[in-house]
Image: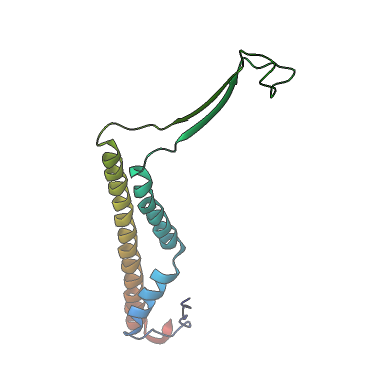
Amino acid sequence: MIQPQSVRAGELPQAEDLSRLVADALALNPELKASEARWQMFRNRIAQARSFDDPMLMLKIQNGIFTDPFNFRKDSMTQKVVGVSQQLPFWGKRDLKGEVAAKEAESYKWQVEERRLELRRMVTETYYQIYFYRQVAGDRI
């Protein structure tokens, strides 16, 4: 993990430190980490959207005797039913669901990129504001 290096009061960071400060801000920002995790979650949903629904297994006993439900020889009307079912979507629907999930994941990707740019801008702006105030005020800060 990258550890941020703090600047002491009255000490102006060097010009080459700006890139390090930006890198630290991008590496340690919890909101950016959460946004990236959300983007990864939506990227993983693409495969899920394109897949079939889970198959269903059905086991059923009809007309069983209530007092002895597992004795199938007592009543000749007792029926045992075993079934498997699978929902099949209409042609092309899975691809459309996958495309929608991909577009949604892409929108979250751009939100992450927007947040990165915003953090970079904020750190750079603050850096130059400190530099300006340091130049104007001199040693009085």
Outermost residue, left side: 92
Position of 14 relative to 117 (above/below): below
Q: State the image coordinates of residue 27 (x, y, percent, origin top left).
A: 41, 71
Q: State the image coordinates of residue 103 (x, y, percent, origin top left).
A: 27, 47
From the viewer's side, name the closer residue of 7 and 77: 77
From the viewer's side, name the closer residue of 20 and 141: 20
**Left or right of 10: which side holds 110?**
left
**Left or right of 88: which side holds 8?**
right
**Left or right of 20: which side holds 106?**
left
Q: State the image coordinates of residue 120 (x, y, percent, origin top left).
A: 32, 68
Quadrant in the picture for residue 13: bottom left
* Number of dots carrying numbers: 0
Q: How is the image coloured?
A: rainbow
Q: Quadrant of the C terminus?
A: bottom left
Q: State the image coordinates of residue 24 (x, y, percent, origin top left).
A: 41, 75
Which residue is at 30% across, 61% downward? Answer: 113
Position of 20 relative to 105 (above/below): below
Quadrant in the picture for residue 111: bottom left
